[in-house]
Structure formats: structure tokens, C-alpha cells
Image (tube, rainbow, N blue to C red):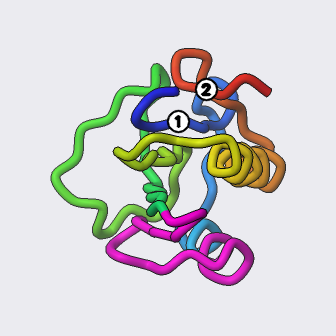
Amino acid sequence: MYDYISLHSVDYAKTVRTEVLERFFISTMRFEKIGPLSFSKALHGAHIGVKGISANSDGSYAYYTLEGIEAVNLVEVILPATKIDEPLERAITGLVMAIVDEFHWCIDEDHGLDT
């Protein structure tokens, strides 16, 4: 696994409004908001982060702040620095698949899970 998993709309073409993304992570997935478009949750004793990002058509992004962004087309699931055991890996896979299913996005081929 990598230090993060990238999830995005096909060809980065479709976006999700930030308020929809926020509502999904806070209300549905029970994450805590820790900053603009940034969320955190404890899973099996480890902290998992999620960040919504606005990327261009090739997936690149450069920003100084996430303040004021109104829509995103990429989410990074930030993995813990600690060793990931099997129960934690299953929980992360479930989280990733919930995001993919909710927004009809895909897992980036360079930063994905074996599913």
C-alpha cells in the first residue's frame, strides 16, 4: 500500500460540490472535520485522513489553501504511518469502496487497493 489512495472522477471531468462531500464524510461516514475539505477518523486504533481536492484534467493540483473551493474531483485517503494489519486494511478498503460507490469515482491506478 501507499501513503495515500487517490480516488477521482473519470478523467477528472465531473465534480462534487464541497457541501455534498462534507455532508457525506461527516453524516454518513462519521468523520470529524479538521479543516477545509479535510476529515479524520479513527479506524482500528489508527487515524485515517481524507482530503477533497480540485484537480485539473490530468490529475495535477497546486493550491495554497482549500478555503473557497466549491467543488472537487479528487479525494485522497491518507493512510496511517503505522503498520497496517488485516482488519485495518479491510476497514480502509471498505471506506474506499464507499467513496467510490457514493460518487461513482474510480481508484487511481497508481495509488489503489487490490479489490
Kindly identify the residue that appears in the image at 51 percent across and 47 percent down: 77
Helix, strand or loop status at disc 1: strand
Reply above or below: 72 against 9. Answer: below
Which residue, as the protein is rendered here, is positioned at the far top? Answer: 110
Tell me whether the residue at label 1 lies in contact with that at label 2, contact meaning CB atoms closer than 8 angstroms: yes
Reply above or below: 98 against 27. Answer: above
- Relative horizontal placement of residue 22, taking residue 34 as reference (left or right): right
Residue 112: mark? 2
Reading the chain from its start, which is encountered first: label 1 or label 2? 1
Residue 69: mark? none
In the image, residue 35 lies at what x, y percent? Answer: 32, 74
The 10 Å Cα crowd at callout 2, few under 14, some 14 to 19, many 20 or more, is: some
Q: CA distance from mark 1 to mark 2?
A: 6 Å
Kindly identify the residue that appears in the image at 49 percent across and 80 percent down: 32
Q: Amino acid at mark 2?
A: Gly
Circle 1 is placed at which residue position? 5
In the image, residue 5 lies at what x, y percent? Answer: 52, 36
What residue span does the magenta drawing correspond to?
Answer: 23-45
The quadrant the C terminus occupies is top right
